[in-house]
């Protein structure tokens, strides 16, 4: 088999990104997006090569010798945003109408609608 055929599928730049962040409001399918990104990275570089975690701050990331990281976050804040920019992270955003997300979360968690609106507002506060 030619060497080129053995290479994993990677972006046009020739290699998988070292850091990918899946970011989205609660109720925006952010967990689904995170899982898909993690699976795509696993297919590209191998499951053992990736560390994945939920983290709202860089200090919450697990310490690992892994070259590749996939993180999930709900919040846009100055410190993690600057860190992601410094690391040249690829960002994958999950988008959903916040009104729909609030209603969906209210139904899923049997929570009052005004509570789910506060959750989404906290996701957006930065």
Image: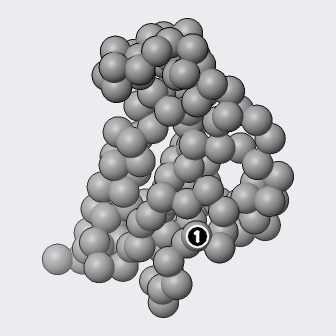
Q: Quadrant of residue 83?
A: bottom right
104 up-or-down from 24: above or below: above
Element under label 1?
Answer: helix
Kindly give the residue lying farthest to the bottom in the view shown: 65
Q: Residue at x 71, y 68 (%)?
A: 87
Q: Residue at x 57, y 14 (%)?
A: 114
Q: Exactly how many numbered labels are in the figure?
A: 1
Residue 120 place in picture, x, y as percent: 60, 27
Kindly give the residue lying farthest to the left in the view shown: 1
Tell me the quarter of the image containing the C terminus: top right
Q: Residue at x 61, y 56 (%)?
A: 56
Q: Which residue is mark 1?
A: 60
Residue 107 place in picture, x, y as percent: 34, 15
In this rendering, does residue 8 appear at all? no
Give whichever of 66, 9 is nearer the camera. Answer: 66
Tell me the quarter of the image containing the N terminus: bottom left
Residue 67 place in picture, x, y as percent: 50, 81
Residue 76 place in picture, x, y as percent: 71, 44
């Amino acid at each position: 088999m030619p060497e080129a055929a053995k290479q994993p599928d990677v972006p046009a730049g020739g290699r998988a990104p070292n850091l990918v962040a899946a970011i989205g409001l609660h109720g925006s399918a952010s967990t689904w997006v995170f899982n898909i990104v993690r699976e795509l990275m696993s297919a590209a570089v191998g499951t053992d090569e990736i560390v994945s975690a939920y983290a709202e701050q860089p200090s919450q990331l697990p310490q690992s010798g892994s070259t590749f990281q996939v993180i999930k976050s709900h919040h846009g804040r100055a410190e993690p945003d600057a860190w992601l920019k410094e690391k040249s992270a690829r960002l994958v955003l999950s988008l959903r109408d916040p009104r729909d997300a609030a209603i969906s979360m209210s139904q899923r968690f049997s929570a009052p609608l005004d509570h789910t609106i506060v959750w989404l507002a906290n996701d957006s506060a930065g």
